[in-house]
Amino acid sequence: MKKTIDWNNLGFAYQPVDYRFVSEYKNGNWDKGLMSDNPNVTINESAGVLQYAQTCFEGLKAYTTVDNKIVCFRPDLNAKRMADSCRRLEMPVFPEDRFVEAVIETVRKNIDFVPPYGSGASLYIRPYMFGSNPVIGVKPADEYQFRIFVTPVGSYFKGGIKPIVIRVSDFDRAAPHGTGHIKAGLNYAMSLHAIVDAHNQGFSENMYLDSASRTKVEETGGANFIFVTKDNTIVTPKSDSILPSITRRSLMYVAQHYLGLKAEEREICFKEVKDFKECALCGTAAVLSPVGKIFDHGDEILFPSGMEQMGEITKKLYDTLVGIQLGTIQAPEGWIRIIKN
């Protein structure tokens, strides 16, 4: 039976549910894992995660579709990306097939927390891993925990979708040949001061430029960029120091195969941005968040799509991908994993 929750007025915040998945890595092997009803984590004061930030995470969602199935969106890509993060951080890879199975099992155990179709809400899924044994020398931990918790969240756009104003940041997000391409907790910690400062200055987000030349667009603290040119080509930045967004990859496919548009992943010089007609941020939380204006140290770029609504092409991308996720539009093979029919 569905939980008694005001689904239409959920915020985007954590609330505990009944169960979470826990697996431990010791003596070179992962155990079989279990479902726990305890939302708390107990670790040593010198655990590797606390001393040297050895942790990574993922984020995806489960949805109720128009025909009342419960599904999740491309979990195999989250499994692969987490494996890549683990390798870069010298952490043991949780097997990708087991990752997907654990996601499905965790959602099933908390099935009554999956919001109903039409509410605009979803079940957010957070897989994560961290070094758990005491470490004092600078080295990888020997023991790890892989966990998944879920929490129901509301629509990212309360009160409707409105374009945001962002700024070009003076801070750097990631170094060349660094860790910007993996979903490490340390990357997000590095962005916190910059986002708080942006909010204090009246901006919704930061636009980070490449730290080597500060001439190319990279991403924000937690989302990739998508631009629309005047001839309706979709362009997105290409860089070895930005996170390979699953939402972005999916939107690029949608642009080409559903909307018949040209789509390019390439280096984007900041000086080009003033010539684009639409701009948006893309990621799991919002799918697409339209940008109406970019502030650059006293100069402003106001996109032709304006500050009142999502641009025409951006809206088509958003509606199509959300339709695929919610079952109103036929999905490409392998994109949707059914959890409950």
Image (tube, rainbow, N blue to C red):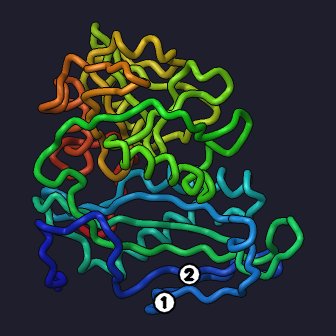
Q: Which residue is mark 1?
A: 36
Which comes before the other along the chain, label 1 or label 2?
Answer: 2
Question: Is residue 89 depicted above or below 195 in this figure?
Answer: below
* Amino acid on which disc 2 is placed: Val
Residue 39 image offset from top left, x and y in percent: 46, 86
Identify the residue at image location x=50%, y=46%: 194
Q: Secondary structure at mark 2?
A: strand
Residue 80 in view of the camera: no
Most extreme residue toward the right, as rendered? Answer: 137
CA gap, disc 1 to disc 2?
A: 7 Å
Q: Nearer the viewer, residue 163 or 231?
A: 163
Identify the residue at image location x=38%, y=28%: 226
Question: Is residue 115 depicted above or below 299 in this figure?
Answer: below
Q: Residue 32, located in which quarter of the rendered image?
A: bottom right
Identify the residue at image location x=30%, y=48%: 286
Horizontal placement of 117 versus 289: left or right? left
Most extreme residue toward the bottom, as rendered? Answer: 37
Name the quarter where the C terminus is drawn.
bottom left
Q: Which residue is mark 2?
A: 22
